[in-house]
Image (cartoon, rainbow, N blue to C red):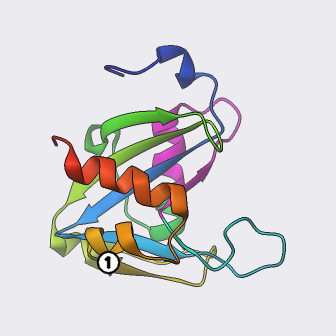
Amino acid sequence: MTGQNLSAENDFDGAKLILFIGDHLAVIRRDDKPGLPFAGCVDLPGGMREPGETPQACVLREVEEELGPVLSASDLQQPRFYTAPKRAWFFAAYLSAARADDIVFGNEGQGWWLMPPWEFVTAPDAVPHFRDRVRVVLEGPR
């Protein structure tokens, strides 16, 4: 992964995807269970690593489980590694608006929708540190 700490590919907790479908982000409303971090917040697809997974394999599996679309490693762009609050990889993917038809909501969370990206960045109910990560992608080169 260019420009990132390659050792982080083997030492991370999970991965998230900033998934653009057309001009919008695919977002998920987190479950509202007691004790769940950021319960009820607007979240990005992705999750925790399974043993032996690479960052790319982790995010591809999680996105398919949560939203249904099958993506490939070549769809993943702008890799960034963060160390807080968890050691996590973030990727961006840019799909056509027609790919919204590929969404089949999984069994985690309360629902999904497409949201204008700048609305996510300012949403008071979005996971706070994810707002900043989306902003970095929006302000940077593709």
Residue 135 spot, x, y in % from top left: 32, 55
Camera-side residue of 65 and 127 = 127
- The quarter of the rendered structure image containing the N terminus is top left
Quadrant hosting residue 19 = bottom left
Q: Residue at x 62, y 40 (%)?
A: 84
Label 1 sits on residue: 115
Question: Where is residue 18 drawn, in percent x and y?
Answer: 37, 56
Classify 105 as above or below 11: below
Tell me the quarter of the image containing the C terminus: top left
Give the residue displayed 43% in from the left and 72% down from the top: 27
Which residue is at a point 27% across and 38% down the rendered structure image? Answer: 74
How many marks do you count on the picture?
A: 1
Measuring from the top left, give residue 70's x and y in whole percent.
37, 57
Residue type of the residue flagged with mark 1: Met
Taking the spot 38% from the left edge, 44% from the top edge, the residue there is 91
Q: Crowdedness of circle 1 by 10 Å Cα count: few (<14), some, many (20+)? A: some
Q: What is the quadrant of residue 99 in the picture?
A: bottom left
Task: Specify start and end residues of the magenta stretch as a single range.
Answer: 44-62
Residue at far right of view: 35
Asked which secondary structure carries label 1, the reply is strand
Looking at the image, residue 58 sits to the left or right of residue 72; the answer is right
In the image, is residue 55 part of the stretch drawn in magenta?
A: yes
Is 27 placed left or right of 109 in the picture?
left
Residue 135 lies left or right of residue 80; in this view the side is left
In the rendered image, residue 53 lying in the magenta stretch gets the answer yes
> Is residue 119 or residue 96 the one in the foreground?
119
Asked whether 28 or 130 is in front, the reply is 130
State the image coordinates of residue 138 (x, y, percent, origin top left). Answer: 23, 54
